[in-house]
Image (spheres, coloured by chain):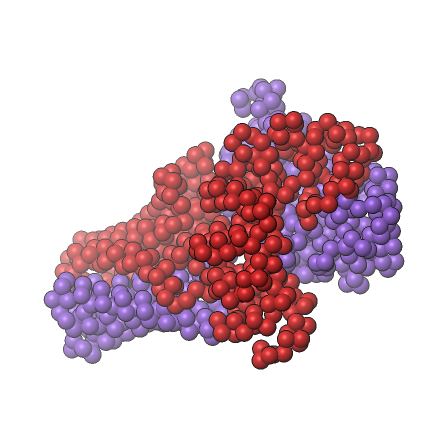
Chain colours: A red, B purple
Amino acid sequence: VEKGDQAQLTELMEPLHAADIADLLEQIGHVDRESLIRLYDHEFDGEILSELDESIREDVISILAPQVLADAVRELESDDVVDLIEDLEEPQQETILGALAETDRLAVEQAMSYPEGSAGRLMQREVVMAPAHWNVGQAIDYMRSNEHMPDQFYHVILVDPRMHPVGNVTLGKLMGARRTVPLLDLTEEMFHVIPATQDEEDVAYAFNQYHLISTPVVDDEGRLAGMITIDDAMAVLDEEHEEDIMRLAGVGDESSLSDSVAETVKRRLPWLAVNLLTAILASLVIALFEDTLSRFVALAVLMPIVASMGGNAGTQSLTVAVRSLATRDLTGANVWRVIRREVLVGLLNGVVFAVTMGVVGVIWFGSPQIGYVIAVAMVINLAVAGLAGTVIPVMMDKMGVDPALASGTFVTTVTDVVGFFVFLGLAGMVLL
Amino acid sequence: VEKGDQAQLTELMEPLHAADIADLLEQIGHVDRESLIRLYDHEFDGEILSELDESIREDVISILAPQVLADAVRELESDDVVDLIEDLEEPQQETILGALAETDRLAVEQAMSYPEGSAGRLMQREVVMAPAHWNVGQAIDYMRSNEHMPDQFYHVILVDPRMHPVGNVTLGKLMGARRTVPLLDLTEEMFHVIPATQDEEDVAYAFNQYHLISTPVVDDEGRLAGMITIDDAMAVLDEEHEEDIMRLAGVGDESSLSDSVAETVKRRLPWLAVNLLTAILASLVIALFEDTLSRFVALAVLMPIVASMGGNAGTQSLTVAVRSLATRDLTGANVWRVIRREVLVGLLNGVVFAVTMGVVGVIWFGSPQIGYVIAVAMVINLAVAGLAGTVIPVMMDKMGVDPALASGTFVTTVTDVVGFFVFLGLAGMVLL
């Protein structure tokens, strides 16, 4: 199809949603992408741009003819345009801003004046508001006569004369009430206002915690500046999760499948370098016991087992701690209880595997001493794993560092060092 | 406060949202929880129950007086009741079902007849629908006269005479239109219908991908059975993420901070046992080379570095693959491109660290051969890590197994075995 039949292509693409077209563009190579876009650009929808991954988006924007790009961008709401351009290079930003109508451009520029990752960047400026003293009939008449209503909205925001939001009325309540009922009688019990400078992570948390659908955003003086809807919050939540999971694995935050090989190498190299340093640290511990090792090679065979079990148990505790910190289930109120629990769990699991490995050690190497040494090392290392796996992320969080970031490396360093040290050290004492 | 002052407690709890009270109940111990609930139960809200973690929920339900429980449950919408009881034991389920009004109980029982984790369990049966031939005025009059409207709804679902949904009209459009406009002229372009048997994961994907707000659910015959709203989809998305991240770490799916020590040990033990088996496998590989090791103890010092770097690089590739599979960015169309990229990235990172470790090896042990051996082993192991980190989750996905589940253990087993084998094998050839 990609060899020239524009009519057929359009027919094929017609039923697809913008998000699906974006996925399609992401999954094909650059050359196919270019020819596909050239054939399809008479229908190119701004929403496709919104849905694209950052790196592909730049590519697509550079392929699109300026006129097509301008048309595509003009259809979007202000928050989508902000989302679109905030990751672009200067010249591409200028092109898109230039394509917008004057008022839209100002709106976008104002949103861009808020810090990255804040509610101000996330909000759309298109809101439906009404003076707090209106009644249902007045609100409905106003909406009927207003041509420029947002595509999707769920609340009418009530404002006082100084433009401070004072309540939300859901459209459902508005519909169901008689025309004479004052709007103030219909406001929702749960009313949450978000400052424009609030971190988007906190915004997503509030939506998830309080089951919000849309909520007003206010500027420094408490005046209504825009609103955030649940679909934006859902997107942020999705990104935060992605970030957590990627950071836990030591992959760059914003890495995506469409990154080039060079970009990917660049993103992952630093994490591997950190890991190399910590692995060398563990090796130095082993080197302390070269003497013992040279006499009992069996120790070299068994030592990775102790380290590996510790690493795994530590990662388990760490993951639970990182998630609990992210969902705010782990707080100052229960941190000691959680630490105690993790250490206890480590001890108990340690005892189970100590017995197992003790038996294996005796059978494999015919030496009760080796069985005894690996058993004790296992208990100690798994208890340390529970401790380190909880304390390290909690400390990072206290210091204002994202606990997902590289804490895995620290935890496995601790379990490696402790595992090798205890196992080889004990062996040295018992066997020599 | 928890020592008897009911009035003051009520005053303190009054401004709190149900979700916050639930968090509070989760963070205190069982004894405090019991006394707090006994003091507060005259105000106990059904939503608090919905917000609680499963294990705490059972505890709270057993503490609550039957009458309080009945009152609390009766306020909830049908989907919340389903969510509440599906994880409870039989007797508690009966208690709650018994407390419901007849029609509500039937609704809940019908929902429970759908398989766990399906759209049918997720949907609420309270919907606002209108015959497709109505106009705006008829719809508004109907809503004004209907006493039992859902608390939150965003669309009027249009149905044909056989109750098949044919379109969605947003309340915003309805408000803005004149009374004589036919509803069919206002339907949304994007209309997505979900079968009640669809997996909730697919439901969440559809909401996220197509920015849905609420969408009708149909039964086997295509008749309207209920609707799912975005806040439910957001909760599912959140759970799926949680599941992914927990499974990747080898922690049981539904583990939570409030699990007891015994439960936690039980959940984590199987994963550690799998890890023990694979660690023993790696040890067996080392044991093959006991001879070489006994002559060159330096190898025992360095071998964990090769294994650790491979494990890390493999986890990086694995995490990207698991996430891409979950977001459906990794498909049959680009799987070969992704595998090629991961192997290339592994090779390039391998070369960088091969040079580094080669130099370290020479300096540390004064032996160019050791430097050479560790360098070659590093390149091979990191390339294998890229390959295994992508191929293993893709294969698990093909076989219908969740790729997040334990694939980490398989990948690190591969990198451990390959790392030890190549490093010690090469060393045997070069040094002996």
Can you give x and y, in whole percent of width and height, for residue A78 in the image? 58, 48
Q: In terms of image quadrants, where is residue B287?
A: bottom left
Say if B350 sits above or below B2 in the image.
Answer: below
Q: Nearer the viewer, residue B105 or A349?
A: B105
Extreme residue in the left direction: B366
Q: In terms of image quadrants, where is residue A270?
A: bottom left
Say if A10 sits above or below A398 in the image.
Answer: below
Say if A38 sits above or below B254 in the image.
Answer: below
Q: Classify residue A119 as left or right of residue B179.
A: left
Can you give x and y, in whole percent of width and height, for residue B367 in the image? 13, 69
In the rendered picture of this protein, how many numbered marks are placed on residues? 0
Q: Nearer the viewer, residue B307 or A74?
A: A74
Q: In terms of image quadrants, where is residue A357?
A: bottom left
Which quadrant holds the C terminus of chain A? bottom left
The answer to whether residue A36 is seen in the rendering is: yes
Can you give x and y, in whole percent of width and height, for residue A254 in the image? 44, 56
Q: Nearer the viewer, residue A39 or A129?
A: A39
Q: Classify residue B175 as left or right of residue A254.
A: right
Residue at horizontal 38%, vertical 40%? A400
The answer to whether residue B325 is seen in the rendering is: no
Say if B228 sits above or below A27 in the image.
Answer: above
Residue at horizontal 63%, vertical 78%? A5
Q: Nearer the viewer, residue A413 or B343?
A: B343
Q: Classify residue B121 as left or right of residue B419.
A: right
Residue at horizontal 52%, vertical 42%? A110
Residue at horizontal 87%, vertical 51%? B134
Which quadrant holds the N terminus of chain A? bottom right
Can you give x and y, in whole percent of width and height, for residue B270 in the image? 46, 58
